[in-house]
Image (cartoon, grey):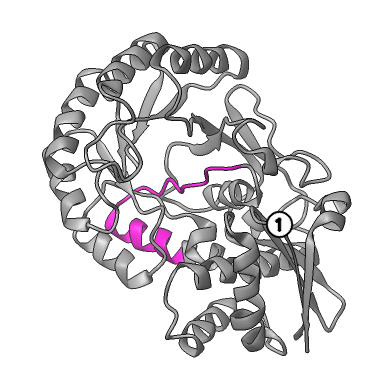
């Protein structure tokens, strides 16, 4: 089998990849979201030349060869583009085998406990508490994540006093028996993060994500060592050597790779394996309802060190208008706080033809 055609369909927010082999078999994948139009240019310029004519059976080797050929470009855009190739090949494999991707990597179809993940910082403490409680009652979620500090905020809150207000307000409103998580999005110095962590511990929050600038691993480790609750991170990291260092130094208690930021499922499986060998759970980052959450669902159904829950974005059209109508059927129904991996082959979805018709199209062929 050889890859003979690589197509992309994109807008500025999300881009899909279709791979076709000389056998006529095909699969659908996705480059990472945000500036996806740029990422698709990278895909055709730096991924396609090394992929066309290649045998996709040894995907790890193919991805490594692309990395070597493009060694002057070790950063995020290359990995975001590689994700499109990787996830499309996995979908093709599933379609050929007549199995979901989860089954191809040692797992199975079935349910996954999800936590409702809030992306909003502009929301007041009272309004955030109200909407999370409604989701608890309507959808059966029993775990929730909300935001503290400001994104890359240098210890400056979204507005003065918001962190100290929102933590007890939301935690107490949700009540006992509910898992509470917060995300700092690289917002704090170690000193301030440890101070906020003390508040989290007092209010029963068990998960403190990315408290310090994510690229400063030593800062994050200071917080991890100082707190009793889990300190987590890794969503932004796409370099395997960085991951080895992060895990070896135990900078975090839970690893959170993002399938699309990492360069696809195959490379994420490598990170999950590193975590497994170190005794660390893997709770991947997947903060929107494009293909990334579905890929993560299949991953979590298979890896032995899967974390307690799936991240599930609760933001609607006011926040992520572009994530709607991209699939023929919505794969993201939540029942009793759980999402479902079906036994449909591949990723289990078809891209909406109407969406594809409106997208910017580009093709590379053998």
Q: Does the stretch in magenta take in 281? A: yes
Question: Is 167 placed left or right of 5 in the picture?
Answer: left
Task: Tell me: residue 160, above or below residue 301.
Answer: above
Question: Is 148 placed left or right of 35 in the picture?
Answer: left
Q: Position of residue 293 (x, y in %)?
A: 59, 46
Q: Name the residue under label 1.
A: 11
Task: Tell me: residue 355, above or below residue 314.
Answer: below
* Quadrant of the frame with the N terminus: bottom right
Task: Tell me what residue is drawn at x 20 percent, y 29 percent.
Answer: 196
Indicate the secondary structure of the residue bearing disc 1: loop
Q: Position of residue 278 (x, y in %)?
A: 28, 58
Question: Is 158 placed left or right of 145 in the picture?
Answer: left
Task: Tell me what residue is drawn at x 51 percent, y 69 percent.
Answer: 77
Q: Position of residue 285 (x, y in %)?
A: 47, 47
What is the quadrant of residue 234 in the picture?
Answer: bottom left
Task: Tell me what residue is drawn at x 17 percent, y 44 percent.
Answer: 189
Q: Does the stretch in magenta take in 28? A: no
């Amino acid at each position: 089998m050889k890859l003979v055609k690589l197509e992309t369909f994109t807008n500025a927010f999300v881009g899909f990849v279709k791979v076709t082999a000389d056998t006529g078999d095909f699969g659908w994948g996705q480059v990472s979201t945000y500036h996806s139009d740029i990422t698709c240019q990278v895909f055709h310029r730096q991924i396609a030349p090394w992929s066309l004519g290649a045998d996709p059976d040894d995907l790890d080797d193919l991805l490594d060869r692309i990395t070597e050929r493009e060694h002057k470009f070790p950063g995020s855009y290359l990995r975001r583009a590689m994700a499109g190739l990787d996830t499309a090949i996995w979908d093709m494999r599933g379609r050929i085998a007549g199995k979901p991707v989860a089954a191809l990597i040692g797992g199975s179809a079935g349910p996954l406990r999800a936590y409702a993940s809030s992306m909003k910082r502009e929301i007041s403490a009272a309004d955030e508490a109200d909407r999370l409680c409604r989701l608890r009652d309507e959808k059966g979620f029993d775990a929730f994540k909300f935001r503290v500090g400001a994104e890359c905020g240098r210890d400056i809150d979204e507005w003065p006093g918001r962190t100290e207000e929102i933590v007890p307000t939301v935690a107490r409103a949700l009540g006992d028996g509910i898992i509470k998580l917060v995300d700092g999005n690289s917002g704090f110095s170690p000193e301030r993060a440890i101070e906020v962590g003390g508040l989290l511990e007092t209010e029963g929050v068990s998960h403190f994500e990315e408290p310090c600038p994510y690229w400063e691993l030593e800062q994050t480790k200071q917080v991890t060592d100082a707190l009793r609750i889990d300190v987590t991170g890794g969503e932004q990291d796409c370099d395997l050597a960085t991951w080895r260092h992060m895990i070896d130094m135990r900078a975090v208690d839970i690893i959170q790779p993002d399938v699309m930021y990492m360069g696809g499922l195959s490379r994420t499986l490598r990170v999950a394996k590193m975590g497994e060998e170190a005794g660390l759970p893997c709770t991947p980052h997947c903060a929107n309802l494009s293909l990334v959450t579905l890929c993560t669902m299949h991953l979590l159904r298979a890896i032995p060190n899967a974390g307690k829950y799936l991240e599930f974005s609760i933001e609607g059209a006011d926040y992520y208008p572009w994530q709607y109508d991209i699939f023929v059927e919505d794969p993201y129904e939540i029942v009793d706080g759980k999402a479902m991996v079906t036994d449909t082959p591949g990723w289990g979805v078809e891209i909406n033809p109407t969406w594809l018709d409106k997208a910017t199209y580009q093709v590379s062929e053998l």
